Amino acid sequence: MRLGGTSFKTFVFYPLLVVAFELWLNDGRLRLEAWALPLLAWGYLQYRLAGRYRLRLGGGGPGMETPPERLVTSGPFALCRNPMYLGHLIFLAGLAFSLRSWLGAAFALAAAVSLQLRVRRDERRLGERFGEPYLQYCSRVKRWIPAVF
């Protein structure tokens, strides 16, 4: 996890800021919603496990700075074209809900906009790299949520 990178921000920096803000706002107490805590684990695990899967099958680096050498269309990538980024969003939603935090919700919304822009750029690069097989993959697998969009 690179300091200053998206993963560091999502899984370390934003949670620390949100917790500190909520402690300050609520006189040193956190208002936890236990039902939302599993979203934190789900989002982080989805990010980590999908990332390991992509590295193992596709090669390249952990991010698009070193793009994959092979197109990965199986496993979590058969359900969603961006399971790692989706893991970020699930985690941030869990952060906002579990702490009932407007700041956490703002980070989640900002991340959704930022990741949507990044995904469009990544998809152009992957289309150039893998050509028709990638375009066929895009036509049958949704960008974010399986069978929805």
Image (spheres, helix red, strand yellow):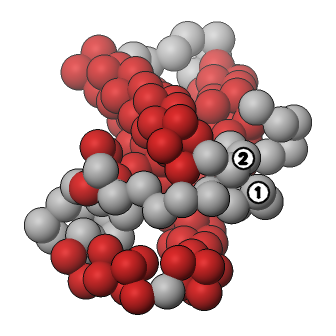
Which residue is at the front of the view, 21 or 38?
38
Residue furthest to the left in view is 147
Q: Where the N terminus falls, by quadrant?
A: top right
Q: Which residue is mark 1?
A: 66
Lateral position of residue 17 relative to residue 89, left or right: right
- Residue depicted at x 58% and y 40%: 55
Secondary structure, mark 1, is loop
Labels 2 and 1 touching (C-beta < 8 A): yes
Q: Residue 36 location in percent, x, y? A: 30, 26
Please tell me whether mark 2 sits on a helix, a strand or a loop. loop
Residue 85 at what x, y percent from top left?
50, 53
As drawn, which residue projects farthest toward the right?
3
- The amino acid on which the numbered mark 2 sits, given as a three-letter code, is Gly
Q: Residue furthest top?
A: 29
| Residue for badge 2 | 61
Seen from the viewer's position, the closer of residues 79 and 135 is 135
Instruction: Name the residue at 54% across, 50% down.
Output: 58
- Upstream in sequence: badge 2 or badge 1: 2
